[in-house]
Amino acid sequence: MAFSLLLLVCSLMAGASAGNFHQDFQITWGEGRAQILENGQLLTLSLDKASGSGFQSKNEYLFGKIDMQLKLVPGNSAGTVTAYYLSSQGPTHDEIDFEFLGNLSGDPYTLHTNVFGLGKGNREMQFHLWFDPTNDFHTYSILWNPKHIIFMVDDVPIRDFKNMESRGVAFPRNQPMRIYSSLWNADDWATQGGRVKTDWTNAPFTASYRNFHADACIWSSGASNCPAKKSSTASTNSDWWNQELDSTSQERMRWVQKNYMIYDYCTDL
Ligand SMILES: *[C@@H]1O[C@H](CO)[C@@H](O)[C@H](O)[C@H]1NC(C)=O
């Protein structure tokens, strides 16, 4: 109880941060394969036959609106997986996932999404995209508040995971999470069910990141610095705390799900 009260402690420290990769992230895997470039404005991960690479955020977050621009491995990216996700630690961890599964040149990437609550996942939804995610940077966002986890691509909502704790479904809301990303090889399952293998003559494979922006509650010393909760009037910076999809956004999400969703755990019997 004391612990959950602590979670509610708010401070006036600002939680918004506009990206510098040196300041916000650390490279955790892959030696020279991961690089922070252009004075912290660009981060690249690469994968070769020996290893992939990865990074994680220095901060932990408990709720927020988190945006990152990604440009995925171009050309024949079959067998590669670029994961970009939030996760807490331990066996009953929470997790919010974007995973990009590569494909042969000309065949669409699959964007895989999932939510884990208290260690339990199996809530996958998968999509193709309405653009080529390797041609340019696109913005992938997670809006996470106590009632919704909304996945967005270029501000278009593709998935709204609602808090259904009243029906016994665990919802991530007590465990602070870090942001993680990695590029690795998974050609045993990733592309067309594992039938298409990685063509290593195309290596190294590279994915790029820029314009990280977190308008989020930052976890520090056992408490959450969360200005958004205090503001009852929705300012542009903090309206994510109360945000849910309005009818226009719902319509856009329905358009995506109708035309681009290729798997939904809800309808998988
Ligand atoms: C790759 O392309 C095939 C054929 O269009 C498609 O069925 C599949 O969903 C795509 N994605 C992956 C990861 O296999």
Image (spheres, rainbow, N blue to C red):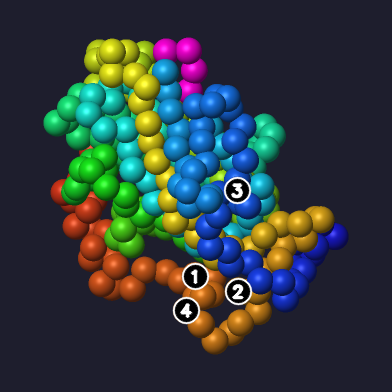
Task: Please tell me which residue is depicted at 17% across the width and 27% down the height of the picture.
Answer: 105
Residue 240 disc label: 1
Nearer mark to the viewer, of 4 and 3: 3
Where residue 268 sits: x, y (%)? 30, 35
**Crowdedness near tag 2: few (<14), some (14–19) or many (≥20) residues, C-alpha within 10 Å:** many
Distance in Å between CA atoms under marks 4 and 3: 27 Å
Q: Quadrant of the N terminus?
A: bottom right
Residue that mark 2 sits on: 228
Tag 1: amino acid: Trp
Mark 1–mark 4 CB contact (< 8 Å): no
Taking the image as shown, residue 116 lies to the left or right of residue 60, namely: left
The image position of residue 177, as x and y in percent, is 63, 48
Question: Which amino acid lies under the numbered mark 2 shown in the image of this protein?
Answer: Ala
Is residue 166 visible in the rendered structure shown here? no
Q: Looking at the picture, which amino acid does disc 3 mark?
A: His
- Name which of mark 2 and mark 3 comes first in the sequence: 3
Label 4, label 2: how many angstroms apart (C-alpha)? 10 Å
At mark 1, the secondary structure is helix
Distance, label 1 to label 2, CA atoms, is 8 Å
